[in-house]
Image (cartoon, rainbow, N blue to C red):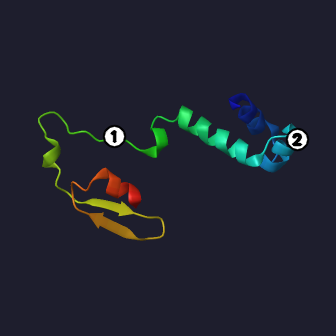
């Protein structure tokens, strides 16, 4: 599928026209296009693992976690908020 996506990028066609020409479901095409992005990205899923530097402990980071959304909403959570809670937001 990655080679088909490369063909699309060189085709000059819209996704819909390309998918119709190749007899591929548009949803399937988007799925594989996202997989290609994940495969070629240095930061899988857009997340970066943060680890303490030398001589620092993870408890040294008591700064609150701030999540800013594109619509202008900002959410501040206390440091040490469980990851399962963060995922809900």
Q: Residue 12: x and y, percent?
A: 81, 42
Q: Of residues 31 and 36, which is closer to you in this image?
A: 31
Q: Is residue 10 left or right of residue 44?
A: right
Given residues 62 and 86, the one toward you in this image is 86
Q: CA distance from mark 1 to mark 2?
A: 41 Å
For the point 71% across and 43% down, which residue is it?
Answer: 28
Query: Which residue appears at 20% of the width and 57% of the height?
Result: 63
Q: Is residue 32 above or below residue 26?
A: above
Is tag 1's residue or tag 2's residue first in the polypeptide sequence? Answer: 2
Number of numbered tags placed on the structure image: 2
Who's the residue at 55% across and 32% down the image? 39
Helix or strand or loop: what does disc 1 sit on?
loop
Q: Quadrant of residue 76?
A: bottom left
SS state under label 2: helix
Q: Is residue 23 left or right of residue 50?
A: right
Whether the residues at callouts 1 and 2 have beta carbons within 8 Å, the answer is no
In the picture, the quarter occupied by the N terminus is top right
Against 86, residue 58 (above or below) is above
Name the mark on residue 21: 2
Which residue sits at x=27%, y=63%?
Answer: 77
Which residue, given by chain and number where applicable, does mark 1 sit on? Answer: 49
Instruction: Give how far across and how far down residue 9 sits, in percent.
Output: 74, 38
Where is residue 54 shown, x and y percent of the image? Answer: 16, 33
């Amino acid at each position: 599928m990655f080679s088909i996506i490369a063909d699309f990028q060189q085709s000059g066609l819209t996704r819909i026209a390309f998918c119709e020409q190749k007899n591929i479901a548009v949803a399937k095409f988007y799925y594989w296009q996202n997989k290609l992005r994940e495969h070629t990205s240095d930061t899988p899923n857009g997340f970066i693992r943060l680890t303490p530097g030398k001589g620092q402990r993870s408890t040294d980071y008591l700064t609150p976690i701030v999540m800013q959304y594109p619509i202008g909403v900002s959410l501040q959570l206390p440091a040490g908020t469980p990851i399962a809670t963060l995922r809900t937001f």
